[in-house]
Amino acid sequence: QVQLQESGPGLVKPSQTLSLTCTVSGGSINSGDYYWTWIRQPAGKGLEWIGRIYSIGGTNYNPSLKSRVTISADTSKNQFSLKLSSVTAADTAIYYCARDSHGDHGMDVWGKGTTVTVSS
Amino acid sequence: SYELTQPPSVSVSPGQPASITCSGDKLGDKFACWYQQKPGQSPVLVIYQDSKRPSGIPERFSGSNSGNTATLTISGTQAMDEADYYCQAWDSSTVVFGGGTKLTVL
């Protein structure tokens, strides 16, 4: 059974870079069948797709965040990561990693989420 | 950019059917998914490819998608179904979520 676990600092200062890692267990991120995805959710608000990485290192990003986002993968550690630069208070949210299946099968596995607060 | 619109809230009595809509331009030409999110929990996929249920999702959850509207229907709504529901679709290699609908079971 595939499980995802987010990790990283819970507090980031404004203008700095937010860095999170998602560790995948029970399956390989090398599988060509999935997109490995980041989503966030500000407190009391809806879900926002940040972006995803897939086989051979391909990436897609939310156009509204594209200039600040980098998603990468470390296959040796079976992890994928999110970097969001120049953060502001508006980036304060719960950050989730998820597995999104090719063929429009939806995001069928989610991490528990990690709360990141942007504050000085 | 592509947008999906959901009603902010829907109320239903226990045992009655509940329908939650999701509107977007030519949404019927795309596949839609639905997620259920209970307070303090991660979202759970309840419908994919418009109308398919993942393993473990009760049969009372069903979906449809045509024209500009996708619909999630819960037949015989139970108190445990009270949650936020989000639709989701793909557009030009990006993922779009609806704003979410709070389902209240009165």
Image (cartoon, helix red, strand yellow):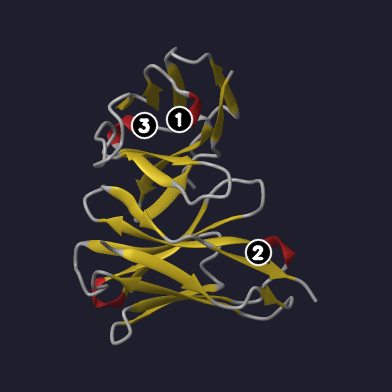
Tell me the mark number nearer the camera, choosing from 2 and 3: 2
The amino acid pointed to by label 1 is: Cys
Q: Looking at the figure, which quarter contains the C terminus of chain B?
A: top right
The amino acid pointed to by label 3 is: Lys
Circle 2: element type: helix
Q: Residue at x 31, y 48 (%)?
A: A106
The residue sitting at the front extreme is: B79
How far is the residue under mark 2 from the one under mark 1? 26 Å
Marker disc for residue B26: 3
User: Marks 2 and 1: CB-CB under 8 Å?
Assistant: no
How far is the residue under mark 3 from the one under mark 1? 11 Å
| Image: A92 above or below B38 | below
- Of residue A70 and residue B45, the one placed in the foreground of this image is B45
Mark 2 lies on residue: A91
Q: Residues within 10 Å of mark 2 (few under 14, many from 20)?
A: some
- Of residue A36 and residue B91, the one placed in the foreground of this image is A36
Q: Residues within 10 Å of mark 3 (few under 14, many from 20)?
A: few
